[in-house]
Amino acid sequence: MSIESPTLGGRLPGWPPFIRELDATLSVHSQYVLSGNLYDSFLAPASDATGPARLLPLRELLWETLRSSGASFMIVYDPVDGLQVYPEAGGESGDESGDEAARSAERLLGKIKADEKPSLEALARHLSAVARPEENIRAAFVIDSASRIARTPTDLEPAERDFFRFCAKLSRSARPVRVTGPRPKPLYNPVVWLVERPGDLPPWLTADNENVREITIPRPHLGDRQETARLLARAFGVTDVGSDEAAAAACDAFAEQADGLTLQSMIEVTRLAKERSVDLADLPDAVRTYKLGVLDNPWSRGHLRRRVLEGEKRVPERVIGQPQAVTKTLDILKRAVLGLSGAQATRSGSRPRGVLFFAGPTGTGKTELAKAITELVFGDESAYLRFDMSEFSGEGSGDRLIGSPPGYVGHEAGGELTNAVREDPFRVMLFDEIEKAHPRILDKFLQILEDGRLTDGRGNTVHFSESILIFTSNLGMYVPGRDLTTREAHVGGSPFASPDRVQNITPGMPYDEVEQRIKSAVADHFTEVLNRPELLNRFGDNIVVFDFISADAAQKIFDLQLANICRRVTEEHRLVLAVKSEALATLRGWCTEELDKGGRGIGMALESYFVNPLARALFDRDLVPNEKITVSGLRREGSIVHLDLQ
């Protein structure tokens, strides 16, 4: 490895930035707190400066760095394995053998037993021996899993408090060491704490202590993943990616699909691919398997395209009177099946398969269309998961979705959303009445829509790349009165019209106008009310507007729901139920007179005007199997409806 002059920016070119930061500041800091991506592998230049880059774990990376500064050995301690001298005795490691490292360690610390697990008091003595050496021996002390030393960093036991007090004092009394070699000027023998989070150590240890430097190790960026993909291509027999365009493209695709993964995870993906005899070009499929933990991918089933084509006939029969909404939804679904969602973006592979925003009047089929999509793609409506966002109106209610943070009640249970996706990532998720959720809750969807992943309260990442997300909203039905003219404020004579809140759309409006008004109201809500224009941009053109139920559609919905009632009577009581034409016409008129309530309003009217009086009449009769019962008439007495049966 080539070592340049020991200037602040001249040493260790090509090494990770956090390593260069540590190396450059050894002359001014005696202790370091490293947190973040601790358990990854890291790119480092070849040891002979001519070969390919290497992937090293953190311990080895630290040792390579410290050795290049003249360190003779590195002591590693963790609460499980105890003390270990690095490099291990019996093997060569660069210029210093493991046996020489053991002898140097013994000169400073005395004889160390294999896997010795010292008390905190003995550990403090070992730290002092390295940080304040009696001989000019350059070394380092790494405390791994330091987060596990204290029961809690804010409520220390006496022995823990004494240990960390000693370490705080040691950071200020450490002695720089001079040695011959590439860096002869005084450098500290550093104490390096490896913690999951900076707050895992007592805050007073690092606060206002210029001798302790905190460094966060980031997750790998795209460039790191691309270089790693090229290194891992050697496992598939490709040694020169630069001269093989197909291999280069496969490596770039691998790096993009690995967004959010560590370099160590990319190594594991490669092992998984080799085990399953997957070619280099098919590594994205191995990434999906690694992320989701499942082998079967419903999106790759050959019959799915045929089912979607059949759905062009079946879905309109189920979602009545919404031809524009059904057509646009199926277009977006076809895009998802072909894997083209977000294809215009540089990196789109990790985004959800499909995103839909259903807006429009209540009772017009938004939920029913979500169920139809679920049955179409996954063959089972049980893959449909619904969240009523009115239950998430409080700022802290987001914990229900992703789980409580550490230390809070219910932390170990996880979140409803993240648990469901981890259990089965192939789902349709419906977030009903999204406008009723607290704005802080909506912020969580930014990461889902952009990156296709979310981290729960336990620190586990779940992936939404194979899910369909559907948001529903009634935005646009009513708008603030000041946004409309006086004439528009009284359109339809709505009882809800007022100077503050007026009806924005009414039955009978052309669909183009309904669509324009609702989309405008949705945009105003996200940009002006919520101040979340970035969330609106994530939805893009995936806003699907539903129209009011037309008179013809209302007739079809009425017939369908009445047939469901008759079928249920037959299934439950083995009766044949019929309705005479005059009674049917009366019932149809009662149930379809308020189109602005949609299909749900027709169902509620049928329940009030037909199901309730029918249940009352049948309850008083002795039912005989296969008996034919005919409804010959209906009459109202105030709010009560009576049926005449034959």
Image (cartoon, grey):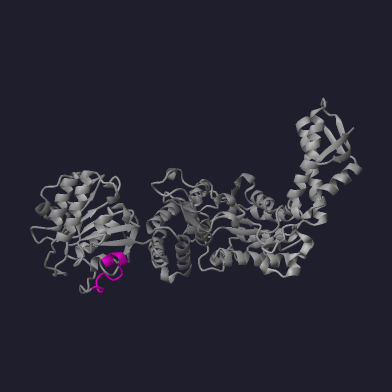
In percent of the image, x 72 and y 54: which residue is there? 364
* The N terminus lies in quadrant: bottom left
Going by the picture, which residue comes out furthest to the right?
Answer: 582
Tell me which secondary structure the magenta stretch mostly adopts: loop
Residue 287: image location, x then y, percent = 47, 56
* The C terminus lies in quadrant: top right
In this rendering, the answer to whether 168 lies above or below 160 is: below
Q: Name the residue nearer the viewer: 554 or 15.
A: 554
User: For this view, does 200 lie left or right of residue 404?
Assistant: left
Residue 590: image location, x then y, percent = 83, 47
Q: Name the residue nearer the viewer: 300 or 387.
A: 387
Q: Is residue 18 magenta?
A: yes
Residue 466: image location, x then y, percent = 55, 54
Q: Is residue 478 magenta?
A: no
User: For this view, does 18 lie left or right of residue 624?
Assistant: left
Residue 234: image location, x then y, percent = 39, 61
Residue 486 visible within the image: yes
**Total tally of numbered discs in the picture:** 0
Q: Name the residue nearer the viewer: 313 or 248.
A: 313
In percent of the image, x 32 and y 54: which residue is there? 199
Going by the picture, which residue comes out furthest to the left?
Answer: 134
In the rendered structure, which segment of residues is drawn in magenta? 8-21
Residue 54 visible within the image: no
Tell me the quarter of the picture where residue 435 sits: bottom right
In this rendering, the answer to whether 274 lies above or below 21 is: above
User: For this view, does 47 lie left or right of residue 359?
Assistant: left
In percent of the image, x 79 and y 32: which residue is there? 616
